[in-house]
Amino acid sequence: MRSLLAVFAILVAGCAHRSDKNTGTQPQTNRVPMLFHLTVATVETNHVVFVGGEVKEPDRYLWSEGLTLSRAIQMAGGLTDFANRSQVELRRCDGSLEVFRYGAIVNGMTNDPVLRPNDQVCVRKKGLPLPREVWPVLRALL
């Protein structure tokens, strides 16, 4: 990621006095317009991805070419016991959201998405499972 660090230096020119020695007149003041000098320095920073939620070590990690979703989760220490393996969210740096099933990725049933710089991985917490008998009642209420 390239971040732009702009350093502004403002140079202000004062009033210059000039005397016309040949005519003997009063010194004239010439106003010099204010000048702006702009210096721009670009700084190369490390690319990172963010891995959070139900992983053992949520943090930001250095991105490298070819880094995949499953590898990023491994870098974060793996999933916790409370992780919902079917709700692994990948929020791209452009704002789009993709949801993956971690088990399907690990078992090779679906592609392991390649991460881009500043992508965010969030592993959701699994909810309390409801007994089968409760589902018909809930469907009837909704």
Image (cartoon, grey):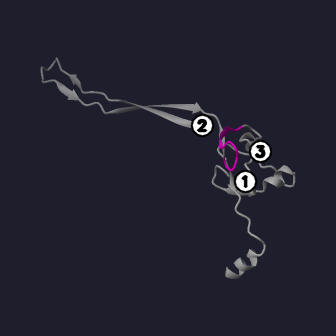
Q: Would residue 142 be found to the left or right of residue 110 on screen? A: left
Q: Amino acid at mark 3?
A: Thr
Q: Amino acid at mark 2?
A: Arg
User: Which of the two residues, 136 or 13, is positioned nearer the viewer here?
Assistant: 136
133 part of magenta stretch = no
Residue that label 1 marks: 83
Q: Residue furthest top?
A: 21
- The N terminus is located in which quarter? top right
Q: Would residue 69 be found to the left or right of residue 110 on screen? A: left
Q: Would residue 89 be found to the left or right of residue 7 on screen? A: right
Q: SS at mark 2?
A: strand
Q: Nearer the viewer, mark 1 or mark 3?
A: 1
Residue segment shown in magenta: 52-63
Residue that label 3 marks: 68
Callout 3: few (<14), some (14-19), or many (20+) C-alpha neighbours within 10 Å? Answer: some
59 part of magenta stretch = yes
Q: Quadrant of residue 62?
A: top right
Query: What residue appears at the point 73 percent right and 69 percent down from the top-left corner?
Result: 130
- The C terminus is located in which quarter? bottom right
Q: Would residue 4 be found to the left or right of residue 53 on screen? A: left
Query: What residue appears at the point 63 percent right and 54 percent down from the top-left corner?
Result: 95
Inter-mark Cα distance, 2 to 1? 34 Å
Picture coordinates of residue 98, whole percent (x, y)? 71, 57
Picture coordinates of residue 123, whole percent (x, y)? 70, 52
Callout 2: few (<14), some (14-19), or many (20+) C-alpha neighbours within 10 Å? Answer: few
Residue that label 2 marks: 2
Disc tally is 3
Picture coordinates of residue 7, whole percent (x, y)? 45, 32
Query: What residue appears at the point 13 percent right and 24 percent down from the top-left corner?
Result: 26
